Image (spheres, rainbow, N blue to C red):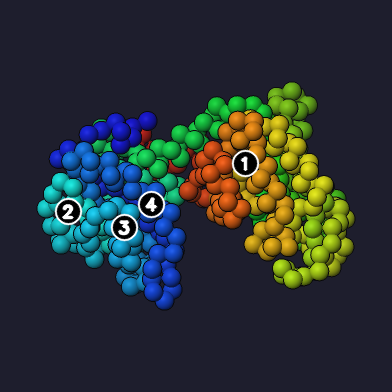
Amino acid sequence: MITVDSLNFKNERALIRVDFNVPLDKSTFQVTDETRIKSAIPTIQKVLKDGGSVVLMSHLGRPKGTKEKKYSLAHTISTIEKHLGQKIKFVDDCISSEAFDQSSSLKSGEVLLLENLRFYAEEEKGDKSFAEKLARHGTIYINDAFGTAHRSHASTTIVASFFAKNKKCFGYLMAKEVENLRKILNHPEKPFTAIVGGAKVSDKIKVLEALLKVADNIIIGGAMAFTFVKAQGGNPGKSLCEDDYIETVLNFLNQVEIKKSKEIKNIRVFLPIDAVCATEFADTSNKCIYPINNIPSDWMGLDIGPKSINLFKDVIASSKSILWNGPMGVFEFSNFEEGTKQIAYAVAETTKNYHAFSVIGGGDSVAAINKFHLGEQVSFISTGGGAMLEFIENGSLPGIDAIERDIVL
């Protein structure tokens, strides 16, 4: 893997694709979560320490090809400067003559931030001409934006084709993502348990099918479990259920049985046994525990129940590799957070006490780990939800392939 540690940036101008798509306060436009900016700092510092200069490019929000003040990357300048420990330059466009003048005149140790790439519709279209213009800003290209690596956009994928193989590489953040995901998917220590939750089967079925090839145990939780319940003849009450995916779910379960019967793989799929149910989708709703396959018609499941928690914790405790994507219930509600909370603790405890390797990914899973202050007790937290899911499905991403393939335009 070619990373920033593989190169010396003395007298080079590094064009770095970062992910500064950070949340902003709606009134003051101040950055409210600095995680993504802090994560990019080590790569920037490596270039500067070597004696190079840096041009940063990113998107922010969804301006749809038009310039909007609320989506300006100018709002991130003070946060970048705080964590980088120096002043940076900013230009209010990314391919204007002024932008090229500023980047070409950068001195060693200087940093320039380009304006929001998505102010141009060509960015999301993966326009080759737009990518070629962006490439003029640097003598070396670095991709350090894993969260957008699953998009074939101009700045994440196409631009790499304008740089020779020894002039493009992964930043520290990207390298860690690729290394850890490849480790758990390609060379997991057994047994390998995948925990998949969330609201919809439609969002995760391809991930589940991909995991059939590598996992020993698959734990399914969250509202998506109710489609499995109904497919098997159970009554999920008024819980969220995707009737259009019942046949898909049955086909998935059939694939599991085929693998077992032909002794291809002894994989086990675990579904919840019980559910914490409510009459309304609200934290203040009445709640009661019912068997997951026999929920009254006027109740809905919002969390896994205590029997399910104990079952899942036992499976996790026996694991050496753990991948978790998606919560077990509506953990944003304090009355329905227990399932997700207990799974988070189980993953952390197994990582610590049994030296398991654990990877957490997806916005809700990461939010849950952080909510329960367990971020330091798991092996790796992925920064890209959609990117992580596509990596599991396909084994790579367009932004990764663009660095590793040897094609120069």
**Kind of residue sitting beneath label 3:** Lys
State the SS at label 1. Answer: helix
**Kind of residue sitting beneath label 1:** Ala
Which label's residue is closer to the chain start, 2 or 1? 2
State the SS at label 3. Answer: helix
Q: Residue 103 got which mark?
A: 2
The residue indicated by pointer 3 is 82
The residue indicated by pointer 1 is 348
Measure how far apart labels 2 and 1 are at the Cα level.
45 Å
Which label's residue is closer to the chain start, 3 or 2? 3
Left/right placement of residue 378 relative to residue 342 reads left
Using the image, determine if residue 194 lies above or below residue 290. above
Q: Residues within 10 Å of mark 2 (few under 14, many from 20)?
A: many
Between 290 and 403, the residue placed more toward the observer is 290
The residue indicated by pointer 4 is 38
Numbered disc in front, either 2 or 4: 4
Using the image, determine if residue 401 lies above or below residue 77. above
Which label's residue is closer to the chain start, 1 or 3? 3
Position of residue 297 measured from the top left corner of the image (x, y, whole percent): 86, 65
Residue 247 in view here:
no
* Residue beneath the point at 42% across and 60% down: 22
**Kind of residue sitting beneath label 4:** Lys
